[in-house]
Structure formats: C-alpha cells, structure tokens
Amino acid sequence: MPSVSTSANGLLQLQLTVNGKAVRAEVEPRTLLVELIRDILDLPGTHIGCDTSFCGACTVLLNGRSAKSCTLLAVQADGGELLTVEGLERDGKLHPVQQAFAENHGLQCGFCTPGMMISAVHLLEHEPKPSEQQIRKAIAGNCCRCTGYQNIFRSVAAAAGMMKG
C-alpha cells in the first residue's frame, strides 16, 4: 500500500483506482470517503443518507469488500480499488443488476438504489445462485423507505439469472 504524502498546503495526496481508472486526489485529513467520491471525484451516484452507516445509501466496494463510505476516511482508500454505482455500466451497457432493477421495479424514489445495487453485485460475485435468505442477508445493511423490499428481492434474483447465462 502506498504511503500517503502531504502537499505543501497540508493536503493529503491519494492514489487509487476508481471504477477501473487510476485517480489522484488531494484531500484534507478529515475528508470522508463519500465526500471524496461525490465532491472531489464528481461521482454523485453514491448517496449520503444518514452519516451513521445505518441506511447503506453510501455503499461502495473497496478492494472487493462492501463498505459504507460515510464512515470511512478517504485516506483509508489510498492505494485501493474502489467501485461505485457509476462503474457498473460498461461501454454503454447496463450491468445485469442495473438492468434487473429497472425491469423488476426494484426501485422507487431511487435514493437507496445505488447502495442496494452495489450490495447485490457484491453478493452475486460470491454467490451466483443466492437463496432469498442470502439476498435478505446481503442487503440487510441497506434501508429502503419506499418499498416492501419484494421487488428488490426479485431484482437481485433476476440479476443472478441474467449473470449465469
């Protein structure tokens, strides 16, 4: 892991890979990862919901692990690989999770959707044929205030089917 350097103005200089692209950024030491993502890297798909990690709207994958970006410092991502909801789409084609959420009404207002999708991607990377119980457990850290979750469960199951063939 690279060591963080400090610029002449006291900002920390970070290097990381974001959605497959090498990125350099300067941040104040207290900058949260979600602030780096939204305000400095201009990737607004990662939402700020509760600032306590309860709602999961800020969920991203950091080094292949699900992470709540509102409770991590940006410096903790230095040298790492970060995937946000913007990184799911490839060459103009939606990721199967994005497509399944659209086709199965897995969203309502859309506020929780990016975090739900990232949690679903993480699950499906490790469990290609999840049971409903596994889906429930995987998204347990994400709160949706609009739905009864049934369409979200259906969306994740549909994405699993799309991804396996």
Image (cartoon, rainbow, N blue to C red):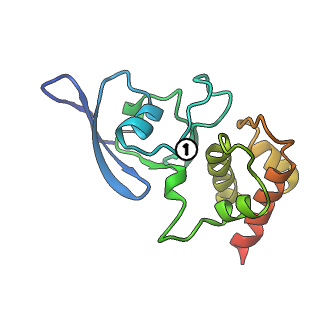
User: Where does the image place residue 58, in percent across and percent down from the top left?
Assistant: 57, 37
On the rendered image, what quadrant is the C terminus found in?
Answer: bottom right
What residue sits 82% from the left and 45% below the top?
136
What residue sits 87% from the left and 49% below the top?
150
Q: Quadrant of residue 7?
A: top left
On the rendered image, what quadrant is the N terminus found in?
Answer: top left
- Whether residue 128 is visible to the viewer of this picture, yes or no, is no
Outermost residue on the bottom side: it is 165
Residue 106's place in the image compared with 94, above or below, is above
- Relative depth, front residue between 85 and 64: 85
Crowding around mark 1 (Cα neighbors within 10 Å: few <14, some 14 to 19, many 20+) is many
User: Where does the image place residue 21, in percent across and percent down from the top left?
Assistant: 36, 57
User: Where does the image place residue 118, in percent across and percent down from the top left?
Assistant: 62, 50
Q: Quadrant of residue 155?
A: bottom right
Outermost residue on the left side: it is 8
What residue sits 69% from the left and 70% below the top?
163
The amino acid type, in three-letter code, at marker 1 is Val
Residue 75's place in the image compared with 106, above or below, is above
- Relative depth, front residue between 57 and 111: 111
User: Where does the image place residue 144, in percent across and percent down from the top left?
Assistant: 75, 37
Q: Which residue is mark 1?
A: 60
What residue sits 68% from the left and 46% below the top?
116
Q: Is residue 135 left or right of residue 55?
A: right
Numbered disc 1: secondary structure: strand
